[in-house]
Image (cartoon, rainbow, N blue to C red):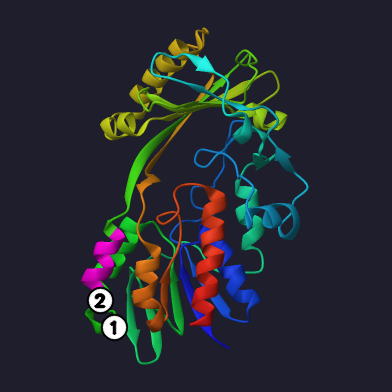
Amino acid sequence: MTTIAIIGAGMSGLAAAHTLQDMGHTVTLFEQMGEVGGRATTQQREGYIYDSGAQYIKPGPVSTPFVTERFALPDLVDIPKPVWIFDQQGNIQEGDPLQNAEAKWNYRNGLIALARRMAEGLDVRLHTPIARVQHTARGWQLFSQANQPFGPFDRLLITIPAPQAADLIAVSILPDSLQERIVDLLRAARYNPIISVMLGYTPPPRERPYYALVNTDRAHPISWLAWEHEKSSNRAPEGSGLLIAQMAPAYSRRHHDTADEEVIHDTISHVVDLLQEPLHMPVFTDIRRWPLALPFQKADADALNALMLPSGLAFCGDSFTGGRVHLALEHGVNVAKQLSYT
């Protein structure tokens, strides 16, 4: 039975793991964090439930059967209201009717529900960052930051963001001295940072005909503003509401080292200006910084995997597809099949 290691238990890694396990392989996932799912995650604080990273899942050839059949959960919701758009001047308009006609899937208790459901039945080693890998005559050996060895494994799939993967490969031992070429291909990916700011209000913000707003000209300090309690009534305490403001990449980059309290205060001012609603005094705030939030320039997965698949190594994830959850799931499945057939 072929043994396969997967570095990273985000959505792409989880999808790949099930695909490989279905095909008869023994799979072990190594995840540096204490939770699966990557950016498809959820926090709960003071009665508020919120998705601070990815906001929902769109339909696709992989995501649809995963969400509605194989990993179906009873608390699945399709966000009923549409997404509208706004520009630099704060002009709000209806969004694309075709895109708004698509399902926007989430869960009553947060997007993390799907990742946790997918992790069931898998061998996932949480809190286990991999510092380097080595290809030997017996396969792929992995080493933790404390130099603890894992393996050897017959094959290896790396699903972490490309900048992190490049750092990993740079200190590893690969066949035929391919580090430099692989690192160059991985470093072609460029990510935007995003700061997510959560603002809870009692009473809730005024009801709108939309669930969220997205900035289309990329010139506003806010790139995304969502009424989180529109996903499900349990997302905020009774009589309260929750806004999530995801700040634009330029803003997030500029305020990388700005104190959380200052960013929150500044975000509130931008929200008030955009909505023209007196929302100066939230009763709850939180902030989450995503330095590797969304790839704006993708790496070439085909070139990478063409080089390394003969040695039993492959790469997948949002570095090669962009930041959509349904695309990450699809890429994980497709690359896993390639790795299985190698």
Q: Residue at point 40% right, 91% down?
A: 138
Location of residue 36 (image quadrant): bottom right
Q: Is residue 294 visible?
A: yes
Question: Which residue occupies 54% across, 19% down?
Answer: 283
Residue 48 shows up from this direction: no
- Secondary structure at numbered mark 1: helix
Q: Which residues are magenta?
A: 179-186
Residue 107 drawn at (x, y percent): 68, 42
Say if the magenta span includes residue 184. Answer: yes
Residue extending furthest toward the front? 98
> Residue at image x 64%, y 20%?
240
Q: Are marks 1 and 2 in contact (CB under 8 Å)?
A: yes
Q: Is residue 58 left or right of residue 142?
A: right
Q: Which residue is mark 2?
A: 178
Quadrant containing the N terminus in the rendered view: bottom right
The kind of residue on which mark 1 rests is Pro
Reply yes or no: does residue 44 show up in magenta: no
